[in-house]
Amino acid sequence: LRRAASPCEGLLTARGPALTPVMDEGLLEIDLEPWSGMSAEERATQDPEAFQDWKLRPEQLELTRKDGSRYKPLPELMQQARDFLARLLQRHPIDGNDTVLVVGHNAILRCLMLVLLGEPAKGFRRLQIDNASLSVFNISPKAGGGRQVQIECLNNTAHLEQTLPKKGKAARLVLVRHGETNWNRQGRFQGQIDIPLNDNGHAQAEAARGFLESVSIQRAYSSSMSRPRQTAEGILKSHPGVPMTVTRGLVEIGHGLWEGKLEEEIQAEWGDLLEEWKRTPETVQMPEGETIQDVWERSVSTWNTIAASLDASETALVVAHDAVNKTILCHLLGLTPADIWAVKQGNGGVTVVDMPADPGQPAVVTCLNLTSHLGGVLDRTAAGAL
């Protein structure tokens, strides 16, 4: 369709004649033909039951084609996404080093992302994709077979006039990972050892402050450890008077005997357990430390308590850690503790979550791991250790 083909061609123009787009009907938008040309208000008036299904239960929506046949648009689109992804990965194998630009539409891109993430329940309403937004997914071979998928960035609109997507009708939470520490830079497992920000970490907090300066913030929450607290304090310099609550519910995973060690040191003493942590993190009990399930239970409980305390008009800043943020985001995306490697959290990266206006609906991950304020769409922050 022209609204996707034209931007794709425009993006490639600056790269010279070497790249030409492949047009694939697997990227066509969802087929809502009976509603074509209608506004949301018109659909709600003419077909109220179906419109409610679309808003609240999109996978159950049934429509009637011109020939009288009934069909379910979203299940059809999910199959279309599966088929497209199979062709894409045949053309660009995951053990290669290709970077692939995919330009499509709102619903098909959401379905494609859901297929990559293993098709979590109610997933369609858990994601937001805005016009001209940028998302980055990393796909690599997984130890033991299959593929490892990581969301590096989701729905980045920082290059557009409105830095963050427009807030919805309910409360919003802005989730930030703390800035860099020396141990992040060195790749040491920090866990619950209270390492402060280094100079670059303070600079990242300052960049996040500038990025969020125009965002209205009414409350702030931080892990009780110094690196997220210092990051939150830096961001709040542009929001004087906003109260900040610190909580142990958001502290980093306890790595136990691994804390303070480099990966090669852990490999030498706990090699099998380290490999299990990388392959199946949900099965690992850290030596004298925590499990990812332990972190999941306290971080998600704390997150839910914060979210439930907010008025619909409020936006809260929440600053925490890599593992904590990953468990919260896996929960919001409908994933499990086994999926923490599917989410990337860069130092100083910004994530936005909008609570649902309709009871019983999932919260929306509006954008994830925005790092444009740190130097680009791709996350170039220190990998650190987890």
Image (cartoon, rainbow, N blue to C red):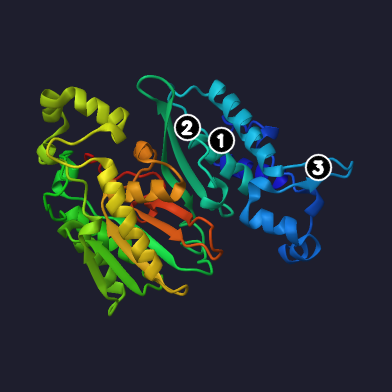
Q: Where 198 falls versus 239 (above or below)?
A: above
Label 2: which secondary element: loop
Q: Give the image location of residue 110, x and y in percent.
A: 57, 45
Q: Give the image location of residue 59, x and y in percent.
A: 64, 45
Q: Give the image location of residue 33, x and y in percent.
A: 79, 48
Q: Where 179 falls versus 379 (above or below)?
A: below
Dot 3: within a 10 Å radius of its alpha carbon, few (fewer than 14), some, or many (20 or more) residues? few
Tell me, yes or no, if residue 245 can be seen here: yes
Name the amino acid type tagged 1.
Gly
Q: Is residue 12 left or right of residue 323?
A: right
Q: CA distance from mark 3 to mark 2?
A: 39 Å
Q: Where 76 falls versus 250 (above or below)?
A: above
**Closer to the camera: disc 1 or disc 3?**
3
Residue nearest the viewer, comparing 82 with 21: 82
Label 1: which secondary element: loop
Name the amino acid type tagged 3.
Arg
Q: CA distance from mark 2 to mark 1?
A: 16 Å
Res 310 label: none
**Closer to the camera: disc 2 or disc 1?**
2
Q: Where is residue 373, by image quadrant?
A: bottom left
Task: Give me the residue at 84% from left, 44% from top.
Answer: 65
What residue is disc 1 on? 16
Q: Where is residue 44, by image quadrant?
A: bottom right
